[in-house]
Every structure is written in structure tokens, then in C-alpha cells.
Amino acid sequence: MNCNQMDARRKNRVPANGFTLMELLIVMAVIAILTLMAIASIGVYTKHANGLSAVNSLQKINQAEIMYSGNYPALGYACSLTALGGDPHSGPPTATSSQLLPSDLSSGLKQGYAFTITCGDEVTSGSTTRHNSFTVVAKPQTVGKTGDRSYCTDETGQIKFDPAGGTECAQILQ
């Protein structure tokens, strides 16, 4: 076989079907880069959703506190989430289980945030202590991962936040 015959054969050769290894590697690299970008965005959106859930939960806790003080005026505000929660199938509401909050919120943990109530301004009359104020704090379980800000509210219903994720809520949420 001479050189002319070999050149003619190469020209008549039909290219193989499919992709080359290099083309497949490039496509896989592009998919990997897009996936990494999507994963980073998911974390940001998750933290934002957790923060919105925390604000909504604080509003629910505030409403439950107002209802609790109306139902139990001698006691004032509840000093624990368990007092605001309770199982509706366990019997009628009581001061220690008022059934005003769902169980996921009355447990103190919801969507990456930990909720705590502290009472203040106590007035004791006989053997009954009435709490005339309260503060609720929603703090991320892991600052930077489950949320960036902490949120707080009190009997005024105004929600404030701490951008550092601590408990010094000084900035008013708009």
C-alpha cells in the first residue's frame, strides 16, 4: 500500500459516533462547577428561611403570651414554653399546659433556632406570683450555619434583632 492509498483511506473514513474523552471531561467539569455554586446558594436560602420562621414563631409566642395572660390573669405572662404548649388530647388546658402553642414550638427548638422565655417584673400577692413582663429570644443553634441573626421580642410585640447572633437585640426589625 503506497502513501496515496493511505491518504485516500483516511479521507473516506467515517468519524466514530459519540463524544471523545476530552469532551466528556469538560462536560463533567462544568456540571461539577454548577453543582458547587448551587450548594452554596442553598445554604444562604436555608439560613434566610430559618430566620423568617424564627420571626414568625416569635409572633406566635407573643400572641400566645397575650392569650395566656388573658386566660390566667392572676399569673400574668407564662415563663416557659412548656406552659404555653401542651397536648390538646391530654385534657383541658391548665396554667402549666395551656395548649396555646404547637408542640414543635413549645419544645424550644424549631428550624435551626432555639427559643427561650425569661420573665421579669414580678409581683407577689399571697402565694401567687404575677409576671408583668417577658422576653423571648430566638437564637440560631449554630451561628453562621442555621442562621446569622438572633431575634427578640417582649410584651410590646416589637421584634428586634442582633446581627451577630447573640442576645443583645438592639436593632428594630423593619
Image: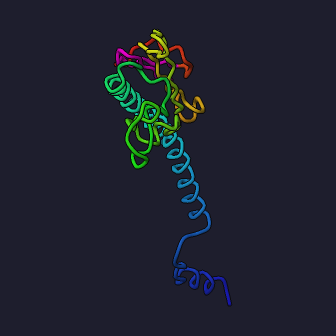
Residue 163 screen position, x and y as percent: 50, 19
Residue 93 is inside the magenta segment = no
Residue 6 screen position, x and y as percent: 63, 84
- Quarter of the image where one finds residue 1: bottom right
State the residue in front, 3 or 79: 79
State the residue in front, 80 or 6: 80
Screen quadrant of the C terminus: top left
State the residue in front, 128 or 39: 128
State the residue in front, 124 or 14: 124
Which residue is located at x 54 percent, y 80 percent?
Answer: 11
Placement of 64 over or under 102, stated as above or below = above
Residue 146 screen position, x and y as percent: 54, 35
Placement of 80 over or under 124, stated as above or below = below
Placement of 139 over or under 24, stated as above or below = above
Query: Farthest residue in the right direction?
Result: 1
Which residue is located at x 33 percent, y 27 percent?
Answer: 71
